[in-house]
Image (cartoon, rainbow, N blue to C red):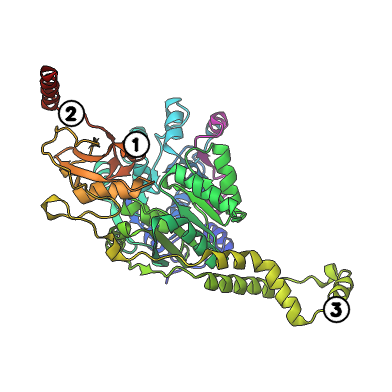
């Protein structure tokens, strides 16, 4: 293994990173740094979150800055305010011993006037979110004409968040001969398009395999019934007394509900989602970084760009629709050589997702056994005793208190004191699990359902009614059933099982009965009971799946159906 000096880094930079605790280069740094120290090289680097990518591009970029030329020479684009600030902080630490190097983070939610004043005084490196940088460019306050390096960090996340046009706009204001450095955890098709459009024979550096899960993360899943998901979440938190992690939910509503329930049940938890103001978001993140919170309950969108060290667990309360999102979620633990755990709480109907994720990230999930109440109480007790053993006792500070304490407890022997200490600490937990009973584990054969027409089988809780009939795309719904339009068709890869899977994963509440499903090239129709219509449309519309936003609405009957209804009405009138 090489040293940082052997990679070609300047003594000032090596001194700074040594003081930060850097001992030897991580694999992505060892590959990327020497290549970027040679001017004129473009790079695509694929490596998991937490593998040292910021230093991989940040250290050579800093070393190549001409400090005497006080103009923007490098632009680092990232998807979120949090990541922008984190990168800026890291680069300031790396350049601690480089006099007069100027760096500026620019992002929405803070004073643009302050950022403009700093730009006027001159900066060498701009770390920016795309929207705010475009605003500064349009105001003619940010000049990119001398920029030599443009770095896209978390490129896949920026594309997922819809920044493709913003990146186009920014690059149009930079010189054509600038270098582009692209860093990403996954390699979706959209990134390949960027490389073809903007990069000149880039050198591709892959640490691990494309889209592969982080090596230091153990992946497991717990199979549960839908009604028991929250109870299992609590058991997992109780079974890991020192847990410090993120619980990912699919929707803003679910995120807030789970966070509220955890807080009510006495856990150090809070929520992070799109309905929070920036001030609320910053407050929650500050508490989480200071470890005043053990559990952060978040949506994928709100958690993008979060950079928090030493997370022990990532818990997927709901699995995402795409593997890239799972990779990003789980990559937030097991960082910088440490180990982490990624846990999915799944229902039987989601087991196909586990198989799909395993195949792409090249990892095998362990099926976990839900901890029993007895196991949890034992684990909590041992955790408490472990903390007790490690307590730092300041003899001088407590010396004057001890005589009174000894007199008070003199009538108790050691065993009595231990028993009372444990009872005082754990009676509530013991009482809860004695009353709770054990959680029923679902059996796979319970998932078998009546076959569809054509011999296909349904899955999950959604069944086909016996009286469903009719053909064609514009037919009227069976009596008592509503016909629903969905903007997914055969070209999107949707199948009858896929439609039912969407309902399983996104529609909460009582069982929904699915009738006929008609698949067309560009869109499809499916039938549900009239009573479930509004609930299904409300909860399914706008969900992201199959790489797009789903649109669902009540289907309109075809003209021929209207004509048939009119004929029936006319016949009735004639009889009267």
User: What residue is shown at x 50% (from left), y 70% (from top)?
Assistant: 372
Residue 186 horizontal/vertical position (percent):
33, 54
User: What residue is shown at x 58% (from left), y 63% (from top)?
Assistant: 432
Circle 3 residues within 10 Å: few <14, some 14–19, many ≥20: few
**Height in image: 176 above or below 284?**
above
Element type at mark 3:
loop
Question: Residue 122 colored magenta?
Answer: no
Element type at mark 2:
loop
274, 206: nearer the viewer: 274
Q: How far apart are the two marked residues, 2 and 1, measured between alpha carbons? A: 48 Å
Residue 79 horizontal/vertical position (percent):
42, 43
Point out which mark residue 171 bears.
1
Q: Which residues are magenta?
A: 90-118
Q: Inspect this view and state whether residue 38 appears.
A: no
Q: Is residue 525 left or right of residue 42?
A: left
Tell me, yes or no, whether the two marked residues, 2 and 3, touch with CB atoms within 8 Å. Answer: no
Q: Nearer the viewer, mark 2 or mark 1?
A: 2
Circle 1 residues within 10 Å: few <14, some 14–19, many ≥20: some
Q: How far apart are the two marked residues, 3 and 1, measured between alpha carbons? A: 77 Å
Residue 158 horizontal/vertical position (percent):
37, 43
Q: How far apart are the two marked residues, 2 and 3, measured between alpha carbons? A: 85 Å
Label 3 sits on residue: 410
Label 2 sits on residue: 557
């Amino acid at each position: 293994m090489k040293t940082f000096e052997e990679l070609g880094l300047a003594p000032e930079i090596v001194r700074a990173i040594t003081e930060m605790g850097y001992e030897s280069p991580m694999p992505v740094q060892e590959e990327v740094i020497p290549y970027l120290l040679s001017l004129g090289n473009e790079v695509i680097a694929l490596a998991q979150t937490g593998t040292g990518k910021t230093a991989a591009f940040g250290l050579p970029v800093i070393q190549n800055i001409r400090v005497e030329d006080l103009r923007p020479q490098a632009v680092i684009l990232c998807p979120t305010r949090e990541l922008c600030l984190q990168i800026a902080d890291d680069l300031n630490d790396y350049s601690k011993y480089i006099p007069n190097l100027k760096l500026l983070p620019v992002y929405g939610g803070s004073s643009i006037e302050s950022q403009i004043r700093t730009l006027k005084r001159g900066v060498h490196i701009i770390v920016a979110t795309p929207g705010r940088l475009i605003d500064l460019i349009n105001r003619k306050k940010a000049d990119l004409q001398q920029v030599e390096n443009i770095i896209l960090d978390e490129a896949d996340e920026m594309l997922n968040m819809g920044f493709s046009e913003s990146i186009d706009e920014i690059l149009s204001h930079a010189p054509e001969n600038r270098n582009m450095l692209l860093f990403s955890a996954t390699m979706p098709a959209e990134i390949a398009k960027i490389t073809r459009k903007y990069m000149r024979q880039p050198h591709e550096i892959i640490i691990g395999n494309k889209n592969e899960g982080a090596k230091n993360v153990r992946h497991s899943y717990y199979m549960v019934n839908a009604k028991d998901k929250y109870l299992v979440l609590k058991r997992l938190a109780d079974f890991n007394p020192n847990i410090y992690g993120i619980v990912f939910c699919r929707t803003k509503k679910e995120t807030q509900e789970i966070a509220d329930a955890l807080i009510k049940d006495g856990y150090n938890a809070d929520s992070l989602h799109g309905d929070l103001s920036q001030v609320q978001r910053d407050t929650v993140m500050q508490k989480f970084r200071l470890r005043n919170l053990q559990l952060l309950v978040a949506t994928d969108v709100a958690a993008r760009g979060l950079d928090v060290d030493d997370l022990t667990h990532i818990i997927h309360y709901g699995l995402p629709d795409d593997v890239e999102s799972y990779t990003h979620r789980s990559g937030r633990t097991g960082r910088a050589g440490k180990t982490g755990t990624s846990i999915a709480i799944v229902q039987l109907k989601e087991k196909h997702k586990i198989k799909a994720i395993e195949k792409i990230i090249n990892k095998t999930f362990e099926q976990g056994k839900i901890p029993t109440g007895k196991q949890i109480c034992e684990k909590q007790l041992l955790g408490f005793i472990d903390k007790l053993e490690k307590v730092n006792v300041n003899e001088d500070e407590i010396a004057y208190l001890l005589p009174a304490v000894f007199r008070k407890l003199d009538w108790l022997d050691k065993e009595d004191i231990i028993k009372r200490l444990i009872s005082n600490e754990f009676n509530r937990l013991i009482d809860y699990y004695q009353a709770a009973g054990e959680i029923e584990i679902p059996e796979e054969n319970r998932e078998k359902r009546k076959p569809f027409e054509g011999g296909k089988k349904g899955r999950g809780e959604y069944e086909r009614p016996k009286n469903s009939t009719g053909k064609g795309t514009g037919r009227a719904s069976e009596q008592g059933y509503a016909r629903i339009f969905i903007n997914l068709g055969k070209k999107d890869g949707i199948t009858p099982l896929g439609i039912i899977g969407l309902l399983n994963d996104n529609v909460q509440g009582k069982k929904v009965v699915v009738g006929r499903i008609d698949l067309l090239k560009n869109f499809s129709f499916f039938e549900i009971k009239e009573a479930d219509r509004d609930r299904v449309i409300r909860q399914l519309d706008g969900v992201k799946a199959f790489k797009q936003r789903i649109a669902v609405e009540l289907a309109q009957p075809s003209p021929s159906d209207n004509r048939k209804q009119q004929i029936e009405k006319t016949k009735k009138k004639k009889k009267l």
